[in-house]
Image (cartoon, helix red, strand yellow):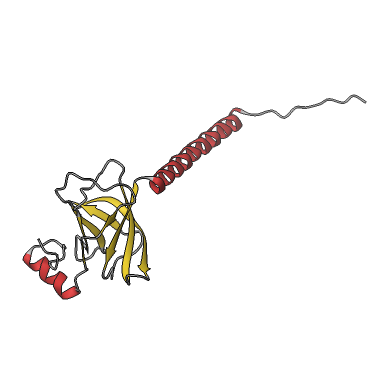
């Protein structure tokens, strides 16, 4: 009795299937790596700032921080300062962007259907806010009637109860 060992043979069709599967797997891993890098980069980007408001009604953590209609950061936390009984808003803005120390913040929306955002009106001071800096020149959010009036008369969502 003679034994023959037959090694499994891979046909051309089998090899093409394996090569195609490997290519699909490589592409999927590439997309996964890109997505992971993008999400990781988005979390740590920017530097932190804080602001105090009498009311941060309508603003939520994760809301955009807008400058001239362009998103430049995100709200990271909203808490109550139990000493001053004011709302403290923590946010991050892009690393390359430095705000003048006399910048003003307001809460509003760029359109009637969008959620509220933290809107920056840059100041003119030569002194710049350092990371972790506090902005106290803030305007409270306007109510729905004020917002509708602002859209009708063209103020673009910026609260009109802000002086200047």
Closer to us: 107 or 79 = 79
Q: Residue at x 32, y 61 (%)?
A: 89
Q: Residue at x 59, y 30 (%)?
A: 15
Q: Is residue 99 above or below residue 78?
A: above
Image quarter where the N terminus lies is: top right
Q: Position of residue 83 (x, y in %)?
A: 36, 70
Q: Is residue 145 above or below residue 158?
A: below
> In terms of depth relative to the viewer, which is nearer, 12 or 74?
74
- The total of numbered circles placed on residues is 0
Query: Taking 85 as reference, is 104 above or below it?
Result: above
| Residue at the far right in the pictured view | 1
Position in image of residue 159 (x %, y %): 16, 65
Q: Determine the image quadrant of residue 105.
A: bottom left
Give the side of residue 97 with respect to residue 25, left or right. left
Q: Residue furthest front?
A: 83
Which quadrant would the C terminus be assigned to in this image? bottom left
| Left/right of residue 17 with respect to residue 1 in the rendered view | left
Residue 84 versus residue 163: which sits nearer the camera?
Answer: 84
Residue for point 30% across, 45% down:
94
Q: Position of residue 29 (x, y in %)?
A: 50, 39
Depth order, front residue of 145/119: 119
Where in the figure is residue 142, as x and y percent of width and height?
19, 70
Residue in the image at 23% along x and 54% along y: 66
């Amino acid at each position: 009795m003679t034994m023959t060992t037959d090694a499994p043979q891979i046909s051309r069709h089998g090899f093409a299937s394996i090569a195609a599967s490997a290519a699909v797997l490589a592409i999927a891993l590439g997309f996964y790596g890109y997505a992971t890098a993008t999400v990781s980069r988005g979390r740590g980007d920017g530097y932190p700032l804080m602001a105090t408001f009498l009311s941060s009604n309508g603003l939520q953590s994760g809301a955009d921080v807008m400058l001239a209609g362009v998103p430049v950061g995100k709200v990271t936390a909203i808490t109550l300062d139990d000493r001053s009984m004011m709302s403290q808003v923590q946010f991050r803005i892009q690393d390359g962007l430095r705000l003048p120390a006399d910048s003003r913040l307001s809460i509003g929306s760029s359109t009637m259907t969008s959620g509220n955002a933290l809107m920056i009106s840059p100041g003119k001071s030569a002194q710049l806010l350092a990371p972790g800096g506090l902005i106290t020149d803030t305007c409270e959010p306007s109510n729905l009637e004020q917002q509708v009036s602002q859209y009708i008369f063209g103020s673009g969502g910026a609260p009109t109860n802000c002086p200047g």
